[in-house]
Amino acid sequence: MLHPVILCGGSGTRLWPLSRQALPKQFLPLLSSQSLLQDAILRLRGLPDLAPPIVVCNNEHRFLVADQLLELGGAVGPILLEPAGRNTAPAVALAAFAALSADPEALLLVLPSDHVIRDAEAFRARVEDARVLAKNGYLATFGIVPSAPETGFGYIERGEALGESGFDVKRFVEKPDADRARDFLAAGTFFWNSGMFLLPAQAFLDELKAHAPAVFEAVERSFEGAARDLDFCRPDHDAFLSSPSVSIDYAVMEHTARAAVVPAQIGWSDVGSYTALWEVEDKDRNGNAVRGEVTLHDAKGCYVHAEKQLVALLGVEDLVVVVTADAILIAAKDRSQDVKLVVDELKKQGRAEHEVHKKVYRPWGWYEGVERGDRFQVKQLMVKPGQKSSMQVHHHRSEHWIIVKGTAMVTLDGEDKLLTEDESIYIPLGVPHRIYNPGRIPMHFVEVQSGSYLEEDDIVRLDDQYGRG
């Protein structure tokens, strides 16, 4: 069977303030009503002999992944939790061991979760071309037919034809300078390296063992020592961290004699910057791409994203303007690759805006800051049906909860109390408490905190169904 492997790491810092460490771009609906992760899975539908997707992600994003998969419906394969990022070779090796444990003939369709593919039908056709090669023992990669002398991508040079499905790989080339990129485009034998692969799982592991034995051995031990946690598979922490951090290209593809490339014209983008996002968005007659409530006068070639308020542009060209609930980015479009410099500066300043949005997602729902002042803070929260917070205490704050939608069962100091809309309850400092949604609709409430310290680390969890410490 064909086992999709969705690589769900990455922080997407070049798309700040939309993409942040706690909610990176793969979980955002940047181009449709679904997230990029969900789009990556939906475009697989229609492929024959398809197994449930295997998702590889980090521990902090596990509930986001699980929720977004649940929203799509359908069967879900293992969710593999990397103890730490070790690049793509160890991640794909984990997935290979997982797939082979259920299917000795497994083929892996390895896909980043944060890419855009506009022509899903053409993509599926190229997958079938690559499947032919993989069944014949080749490790196939998808080479994007270049449309410009791009210097931001690695390249693949094709060799001899392998029937009608693709070509063997002559060589991989690092990101070129502008002159070499123009030469590659003119030659017609080079493709952009997409980072997508179709691999026979056992053949991939054999090549990994031959060319990067330290990676193979570390991941093998890690998978053998894996533990199950709810819907997640946790590889052994120490064994996985002993693996070198290396990409699948460096570890295997540049060394194997089995490498093949399938040319692909599929409307692909890695959405690695706001310029790339602007390129794949629909535009008005002046070349502006907008989302949200935006008014433009004599504006040309701009990307504008407004989350909660009106944004107006007048007499400007080639700008990126992104307005979120807690941050505003204004940049020259040709400097969009440098947004990561802003993120680096925020880290140096010790600010939180690079890491979290005002709306923070939790396994039970979400919370969003509304107002904050001296010794008080107001939040709005949503608890999903059937979900509950941890049983917890605070040492520095008390709380007042007002139910505004739905029904809540509040446990306070061992006693349960049912609250409905417009009812409230006081949570004294130091008293164990929990809130649970017993209903069938999302429950919303407002929380007013007061005290000497109001940060999130003033939470002592006494019991938690999600396994959080």
Image (cartoon, grey):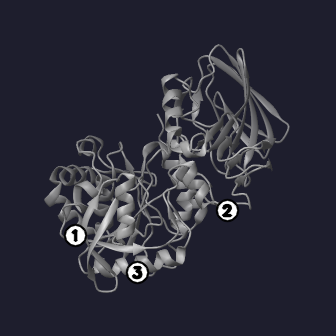
Kindly identify the amino acid type of the residue bearing the numbered disc 2: Asp
Toward the viewer: 357 or 74? 357
Toward the viewer: 273 or 292? 273
Determine the residue positioned at 18% across, 69% down.
Answer: 257
Counting residues from the start of the chain, the first of labels 3 and 1 encountered is 3
Pointer 2 with pointer 1, Cβ within 8 A: no
Q: Quadrant of the N terminus?
A: bottom left
* Picture coordinates of residue 191, whole percent (x, y): 37, 67
Determine the residue positioned at 55% across, 58% down.
Answer: 36
> Would you say 184 lies left or right of 387 here?
left
Kindly identify the amino acid type of the residue bearing the numbered disc 3: Glu
Helix, strand or loop for disc 1:
helix
Pointer 3 with pointer 1, Cβ within 8 A: no
How far apart marks 2 and 1 lie (CA) works out to 41 Å
Kindly identify the amino acid type of the residue bearing the numbered disc 1: Ala
Tell me if residue 200 comes above or below residue 236 in the rendering.
below
> Would you say 276 lies left or right of 208 here?
right
- Which residue corresponds to mark 2? 282
* Picture coordinates of residue 2, whole percent (x, y): 38, 74
Of tags 2 and 3, which is closer to the observer? 2
Determine the residue positioned at 71% across, 52% down.
Answer: 300
Of tags 3 and 1, which is closer to the observer? 3
Toward the viewer: 256 or 170? 170
Pointer 2 with pointer 3, Cβ within 8 A: no
Residue 78 visible in this rendered orientation of the protein: yes
Q: Crowding near pointer 2: few (<14 within 10 Å), some, many (20+)?
A: few
| Outermost residue toward the bottom in this view | 163
- Which residue corresponds to mark 3? 128
> Would you say 110 lies left or right of 360 here?
left
How far apart marks 2 and 3 lie (CA) works out to 29 Å
Q: Which mark is residue 458?
A: none
- Which residue corresponds to mark 1? 203
